Structures are given as structure tokens and as C-alpha cells.
Image: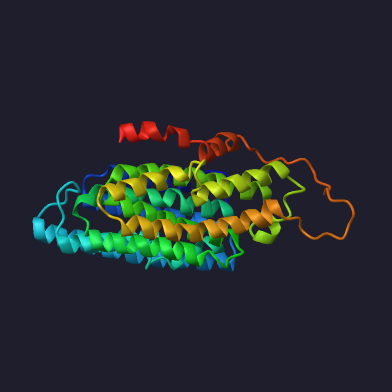
Amino acid sequence: MKPPIFTIIMLTVILGTMIVMTASHWLMVWIGFEMNLLAIIPILMKKYNPRAMEAATKYFLTQATASMILMMGIIINLLHSGQWAVSKDLNPMASIMMTTALAMKLGLAPFHFWVPEVTQGISMSSGLILLTWQKIAPLSILYQISPTINPNLLLTMSIMSVTIGGWGGLNQTQLRKIMAYSSIAHMGWMTAIMMYNPTMMILNLVIYITMTLTTFMLFMHNSTTTTSSLSQTWNKTPLITSLILVLMMSLGGLPPLSGFMPKWMIIQELTKNEMIMMPTLLAMTALLNLYFYMRLTYTTALTMFPSNNSMKMKWRFECTKKTTFLPPLIVMSTMLLPLTPMLFILD
């Protein structure tokens, strides 16, 4: 794709999301979603091949269906209340339909089937946009309508998402599919806290985007897409291999790292709201995620791949890929935990 065309399309994607986030009129929200959807399709098919075409088609059909359900919810709300304002309380039926539509757009269980398939079919850079930027618009609308959402519906979907996000990634060898299941699980954590403390959902989203962005950038720097290709990076880029290890632990939510912060705060907030089973289930299913991150770290940094030659160091050319943003992103993805007390005060 030529740079000017790519720039225009990317600006349209950004504009679509911005319209959704800033609109106070339901029709503008819907138009923002449509702009975003139509502009993201060529980005998904940037490297044109049949798999990318199939992935883009799956994505389009799912998102178009979700947009249709969202519009139906908006119309039901309009017929019931006679107004288009996003800030007004929703009719219960309209709220259920909108929540379902936004869950489809996010890839929450049981509408999660498209996420691994689409992510696997497209390039790493397109997958990065799909799993980070594309989550912002639906979550911003969920944030705005959170007081009128049916709590049973949302909490059921969040528990299912965390469970499926853990189970689905267990047997995967493709890094993009692993990141897709990781995304489903993180969306589950975000929607679990949505009813009780929407601001905490934003904190979780920021940390999730930072960690996912860093992970994808490291994978793209190594040009790795599978576990086996990742296992051969230790003798090319040993420092980056060890950084991937730390980052995976952070994604899994281990205590001294940034990824533990949102999990800790969410479990504490749910416990404050006299919910014991919910955080217990979330913490137990998070162990499934931690298991497949551990598998990745084991194959990447803790084992040596079998080689016939006596020389362990591979001949390599100097890397020409820019790593300008990697150092600050890695620091943010791993070392934010000491800021937690400050965030508790702000909250």
C-alpha cells in the first residue's frame, strides 16, 4: 500500500474512533463505528493473500452484524424515550441489545470466535491495531452506558471471556492466536469491573494496550510468528529474548510487574462490593493464562533449541529496524507497580 493512501486510511480509522468517543448523539456514535469499520478493512488486507482476505471478510461480517444490532438498540431506545442523547438512561431492552452489540465488537465470549481467526490471518502490524486501537471505541461506549447495563449479562460474559481466554490459548503454537486469546481474557477483566468502577476499566485498558503494544513490537523486531521461531532468538538477540520473558510474566499478572496492578485493583474493588466468588473465579482462571505465558517463556528463554553445529552463535547482519519506542514501552510494561498507591488515592 502506498504511504499517502495508508496515511489517509489510518487517519479515517482514528477519526472514526474519536467520533465515537466524543459524540453525544447516538447516530454520530453509529456513524463513527461505521467509518472505523470501513477504513480498517484495507489495513487488515495490507499484505494481500487469501488468508488476509478471509480474515477481513470474517471481521467485516461480524462487525456489520454488531453495528446492525447496535442500531436496532438505538431505535428501540428512541421509540421508548423520544431522544438520541447518549447521556440519558437507556430502556432495559435497548441496553441489552447495545451491550450485546458492543460485546461482539470487542470479541467478548460467547461472541469471541472471530478474534483468533482474524488475528491469525492478518500481518503482525495489522493484528496490533486490531487488538489495541479497535478496543477503545466499544469500551468508551460501554463506559458511558455502564449505569444502565444489565449486571448479570455483563458479569456472565466477563467470566466466560476470562475462562475461554485462558483455555483457548493453552494448546496454541501461533503467537498471534495466543495474543488474541490473551486479549479476550483481558477484555473479560475489564468488563468485570465496568459495573462497579468504570475508571478502573480505563486504567486496565491503558496497561493492557501498553503491554500488548510492547509484545507485538518485540515479535515484529524478531520477525517471529510461532513458538518454534521464537525459541531460536536467544542466540540472535539474547537481551530481547530475556525482555520477552519479563513481558510475558507481566501479561500474566505476576506481582512485581505492571500487569499485576490492574488485577490487584479489580480484585480489591470487587471484594469491597461484597463479591467473593467473582474475584476468586477470575483469579483462578487467570492461572490458565499464566500457564501459556510460562510455556512461551520456557521455549524462548529457558531452553536451547537443538542444533547440529558446534557453533552456537548464529551469523547475523546488523538490525536495521528502529527501536525508538521500545525502551520506554518496556519500562511502562514492567515497572509501574510502585505507582499503585497513588492511583488508589486518585481513585
Q: Which residue is drawn at 22% across and 44% down?
A: 24
> What is the x, y in percent for residue 190?
36, 51
- Nearest the viewer among 266 and 213 is 266
Location of residue 176 by image quarter: bottom right
Depicted 73 relative to depicted 311: above or below: below
Q: Position of residue 161 (x, y in %)?
A: 39, 62
Coordinates of residue 330 in the picture (x, y in percent): 57, 39
Residue 6 seen from this side: no
Query: x, y percentage for residue 3?
Result: 56, 44
Q: In the image, is 44 to the left or to the right of 301?
A: left
> Along the line of sight, which residue is nearer the eye, 317 or 231?
231
| Image quadrant in which the C terminus is located | top left
The answer to whether residue 139 is left or right of residue 302 is: left
Residue in view at x 46 percent, y 57 percent: 286
Please report the residue visible at 84 percent of the width from the left and 47 percent of the height from the top.
Answer: 315
Q: Which of 230 and 5 is in front in this view?
A: 230
> Is any part of residue 11 visible from this angle?
yes
**The furthest residue to the right:** 310
Front-most of 40 and 94? 94
Q: How many labels does the image show?
A: 0
Q: At 53% from the left edge and 43% from the top edge, which residue is drawn? A: 4
324 displayed left or right of 209: right
- Identify the colour scheme used: rainbow
